[in-house]
Image: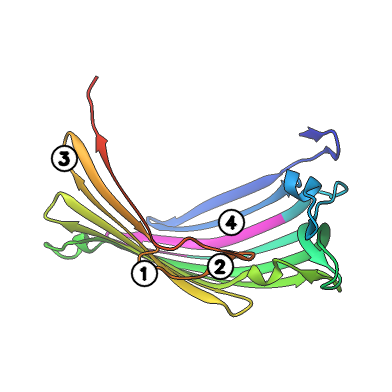
Amino acid sequence: MKYSDWGWEYWPGAECNVEFTEGLHWFASAGRSFRIPTFTELYYDTPANQGNPNLKPEQAWTYETGIRWREKGLGTNLSLFYRDEEDIIDWSRASDEEPWTARNIAENRTRGIELGVDFFPGAFFRTTFVSTVNVAYTYLDSDWDAGNLESKYAIDTLRHQVHGSVILDWLGTLTQVVKVRYEERMSGDSHMVTDTRLAYKSRKYELFLDVTNLFDEQYVESGFSPAPGRWIVGGVKLHVDL
């Protein structure tokens, strides 16, 4: 693709998958990504934040390899990945007396590992109200280099993330999904958020109740803005044959 400001850009990529035995696979991939600056990063102008019309696009190469194993009722995956980023756009400043300014200041090398397990109890037990259990863990190690400038978002990088979900079947027509997410950032800040969805399904309609951030956890997802507290949404879906 050709951009009027940055010329031709390309996004090559390749991936492969090898089946060793039925259910056991090895995979690998490599690819380049490219992100142009946003309107805010280019032109935002306030006393506290200054955009920069001379920004260059971000560029990155990502590599990943791993294995997947699946058997009746059980599955797991393990992957290793590496991401090499250049010209990262971040809001930075040299001192507290200066406004935050968008700059291509940073380079970042991220190494990580991800492990996931899927379990389907129904394959092993004749009667169970637990339909599906999923658990995954991700570890990230980043070498963020912003020079001598103070970076607004560098410490937002995740270090540890654990997320899991359980699907429960109540009485055959009532389904509940519970999702839990724990995150710890490089700064040491951490939080755990629980979401749940309860749904009753019939042939003609579905009733549902969603609760996001069930325990009203107070945390900051990114930057300085607090994430929403407990959020409850209910509704009805109708199935109409036309």
Label 2 sits on residue? 220
Residue that appears at 51% across and 70% down: 219
Q: Earlier in the sequence, mark 4 or mark 1?
A: 4
Which of labels 1 and 3 is toward the front? Answer: 1
Residue that appears at 35% across and 65% down: 214
Location of residue 102 by image quarter:
bottom right
Q: Earlier in the sequence, mark 1 or mark 2?
A: 1
Nearer to us in this view, 39 or 3? 39
Q: Which mark is residue 28?
A: 4
How would you rate the neighbour count of disc 4 (Cα within 10 Å): few for under 14, some for 14-19, many for 20 or more?
some
Q: Which residues are magenta?
A: 61-77
Label 3 sits on residue? 202
Q: Earlier in the sequence, mark 4 or mark 2?
A: 4
Disc 1 secondary structure class: loop
Q: Main secondary structure of the magenta part?
A: strand
Q: Position of residue 29 (x, y in %)?
A: 61, 53
Q: Is residue 59 left or right of residue 240?
A: right
Give amino acid for label 3: Ser
Give amino acid for label 4: Ala
